[in-house]
Image (tube, rainbow, N blue to C red):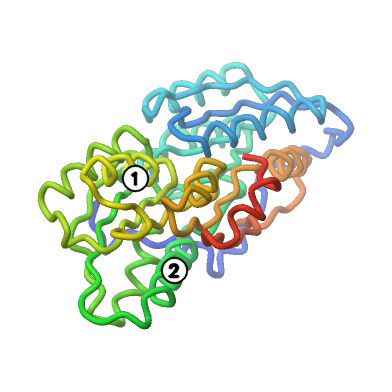
């Protein structure tokens, strides 16, 4: 895809004023919904918690949830959406694996007058009226927060700061935007250099594998690991230890998501910080689904409220973690 044609999600939203397009006045908000949920898979702690949140919220509200695990394949998500359309569900929730390739199937949903709510990740389509609202995080800001923590944590050091980056799934919104936000912050200071950057598909196994390759190529030149999610960071920590180095000391470790595994790693002194990205979107999604079916206007972006958790607060905060 031509990078000049790709617009950030924030830019897409500016001035659109778009709201729900599928008003059904005869429908009552008291009625229980049939909701189709096309999930990406179960590739991480975050994603598992996200699935559990949606299932629990649907059950609590009394809605029927038709769930599809795409096993990290876009074609499976497209098949699931078409199945939901054929079953005439009331609302479709889509956690898009990647940003592009959705134009045709989302047009089909619009033609069937079924509102589509995007969750956790966004899409780039020619017709933005084919989806109703996006429920999720500001991934660019998450990248910025990771970069700001690094600048603050290393402000009293001298010399180059060599960074290796484990990117998320190629073409996915969080991978694109977490990189963008991080780069935006560190580029102002020339001593911060990303010397290696490669996808590890948001998984622990791939995080370990790619970090092993980084260590083999760069060795002790590496000062910082920035991983687009905690699972990749945890996998990379294994590789760092097996190489005879101390994670969080010899190599600073920055992750994103703030899952329990990251807190455990921080408490063990093996990880420095995790930027929060909450997967607990179920209640917000159920509320949005009811409004979408009723034809009520919705904001284009329903944001999560999130923070940053350095290792210093991990032990205190750990008991409060729900995922």
Q: Which of the 4 quarters of the picture holds residue 88? A: top right
Q: Position of residue 72 (x, y in %)?
A: 39, 29
- Residue 62 lies left or right of residue 81; in this view the side is right
Location of residue 33 with respect to 318 vertically, above or below: above
Taking depth in this image into account, of 27 and 305 the one nearest to the observer is 305
Residue under the image location 59 percent in, 21 percent down: 67
Give the alpha-carbon distance from disc 1 to disc 2, as whole Å: 22 Å
Residue identified by numbered label 1: 237
Location of residue 229 with respect to 157 vertically, above or below: above
Q: Position of residue 36 (x, y in %)?
A: 61, 26
Any part of residue 125 in sight:
no
Residue under the image location 72 percent in, 29 percent down: 56
Element under label 1? helix
- Residue 153 lies left or right of residue 15; in this view the side is left
Residue 256's label in the rendered image is none
Residue under the image location 48 percent in, 61 percent down: 142
Q: Which of the 4 quarters of the picture holds residue 100? A: top left
Q: Nearer the viewer, mark 1 or mark 2?
A: 1
Q: Position of residue 266 (x, y in %)?
A: 49, 52
Residue identified by numbered label 2: 144
Any part of residue 101 in sight:
yes
Labels 1 and 2: the sequence-earlier one: 2
- Residue 132 lies left or right of residue 106; in this view the side is right
Element under label 2? helix
Q: Which of the 4 quarters of the picture holds residue 103? A: top left
């Amino acid at each position: 895809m031509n990078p000049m044609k790709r617009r950030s999600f924030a830019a897409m939203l500016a001035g659109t004023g778009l709201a729900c397009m599928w008003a059904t006045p005869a429908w009552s908000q008291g009625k229980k919904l049939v909701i189709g949920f096309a999930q990406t898979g179960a590739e991480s702690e975050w994603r598992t918690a996200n699935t559990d949140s949606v299932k629990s919220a649907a059950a609590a509200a009394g809605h029927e949830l038709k769930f599809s695990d795409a096993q990290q394949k876009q074609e499976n998500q497209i098949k699931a959406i078409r199945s939901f359309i054929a079953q005439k569900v009331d609302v479709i929730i889509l956690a898009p694996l990647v940003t592009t390739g959705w134009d045709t199937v989302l047009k089909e949903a619009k033609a069937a007058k079924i509102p589509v709510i995007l969750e956790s990740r966004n899409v780039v389509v020619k017709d933005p009226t084919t989806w109703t609202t996006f429920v999720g995080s500001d991934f660019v800001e998450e990248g910025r927060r990771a970069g700001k923590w690094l600048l603050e944590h290393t402000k009293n050091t001298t010399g180059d700061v060599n960074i290796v980056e484990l990117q998320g799934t190629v073409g996915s919104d969080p991978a694109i935007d977490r990189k963008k936000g991080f780069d935006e912050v560190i580029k102002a200071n020339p001593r911060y250099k990303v010397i290696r950057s490669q996808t590890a598909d948001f998984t622990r196994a791939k995080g370990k594998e790619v970090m092993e390759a980084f260590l083999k190529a760069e060795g002790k030149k590496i000062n910082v690991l920035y991983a687009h999610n905690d699972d990749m960071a945890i996998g990379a920590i294994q590789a760092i230890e097996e190489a005879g180095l101390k994670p969080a000391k010899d190599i600073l470790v920055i992750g994103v998501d703030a899952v329990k595994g990251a807190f455990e790693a921080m408490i063990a002194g093996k990880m420095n910080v995790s930027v929060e990205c909450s997967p607990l979107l179920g209640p917000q999604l159920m509320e949005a689904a009811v409004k979408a079916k009723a034809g009520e206007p919705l904001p284009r972006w329903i944001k999560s409220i999130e923070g940053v958790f350095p290792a210093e607060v991990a032990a205190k905060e750990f008991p409060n973690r729900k995922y």
